[in-house]
Image: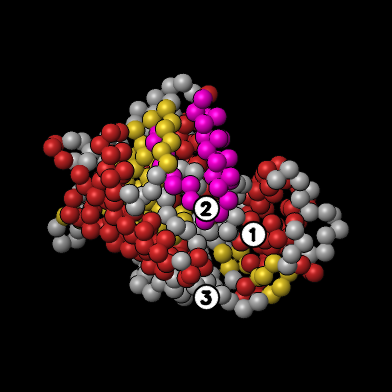
Amino acid sequence: MSILIGEKTILVTGAAGFIGSNLVLKLLKLNKNISVVGLDNLNDYYDVSLKEWRLKQIQTEADKHTYCKFTFVKGDLADKSLIDRLFNEYKFDIVVNLAAQAGVRYSITNPDAYIQSNIIGFYNILEACRHSYDNGEKGVEHLVYASSSSVYGGNKKVPFSTDDKVDTPVSLYAATKKSNELLAHAYSKLYNIPSTGLRFFTVYGPAGRPDMAYFGFTSKLVNGEKIKIFNYGNCKRDFTYVDDIVEGVYRVMQKPPKEKNGEDGLPLPPYAVYNIGNSNPENLLDFVNVLQQELIKAGVLPKEYDFGAHRELVSMQAGDVQITYADTSALERDFGFRPNTPLREGLRKFAEWYKEFYNI
């Protein structure tokens, strides 16, 4: 059972995004007298109407609770003056940085977006956290930020552990996420900012990102188009249901890492990194078969749908990896939680949402 956060002021960047919007909903549902500021630039990387729909869900929830306050700010992480103004105005207790330019393949053709959002934007957040302690102010209690399983690159050892060396990213997206971890560590060491990075593993669920495989596959199948299954279906992904991700973030928010001494007696920064994944990699072909079955069951696809005629097995794409597999033992040890939503259950909820959202 989730414990209450209390009377805190929280910044959630990427609040109109998939994970961000679900986190804000959870914060509003569970906590009294909480104040949440949601920042998002509502860019058109994917359908903006989906982001607007998520914001409507948040506002509906906020309206139910007169003791909660939700403020949405449309703006960009890369706008330093805006970030500084928000920190000065709201005096955030907790900062959850989920805003980022996502997507491995998009980073190959549009690198500028990743440098602006994932590097410059994150730097602005770190600087604002640093200066939140100026003039004896209490400052930010905890910075939680999204990293990614992509940082593991082509690692052969599985499951992926946060103790593994991750110096060989295979995409710019992965490199920016690893950079976030390095920057956070430096700021944590220099300015004593309690910070926790979370490596998310292939997040899926209702109202997710249309560029993710399960969502894109569904849209193509509904339109009678062929879907491409990469590496001839031999990729494995640690699919993690969005509610599990949000529960993990929620628990981590409430327990900032403490400064402690290392084996040499010298102080270690209040810094941590955790995996959040389902710890159960699924073969891509099996995943697609379950998706198809649930789409038929939900009435998104007709019962007699010829699935075989609408799929094509193709070779691996640039930037992809063969397997992702999370070792979540540290998360379980420190927070008593591990994701466990079965794939079929998660895809069923997605299929039901898709039918309703697109009025099929």
Residues rendered magenta in the picture: 36-63
Relative depth, front residue between 124 and 320: 124
Residue labelled with disc 3:
318
Mark earlier in primary sequence (1, 2): 2
Mark earlier in primary sequence (2, 3): 2
Relative depth, front residue between 144 and 356: 356
Residue labelled with disc 1:
216
Residue 217 percent coordinates (x, y): 67, 61
Relative depth, front residue between 98 and 2: 98
Residue 298 percent coordinates (x, y): 76, 47
Q: Residue at x 74, y 53 (%)?
A: 295
Q: Residue at x 68, y 43 (%)?
A: 357
The quadrant holding residue 133 is top left
Q: Residue at x 44, y 71 (%)?
A: 171
The three-letter code of the residue at mark 1 reads Gly
Q: CA distance from mark 1 to mark 3?
A: 18 Å
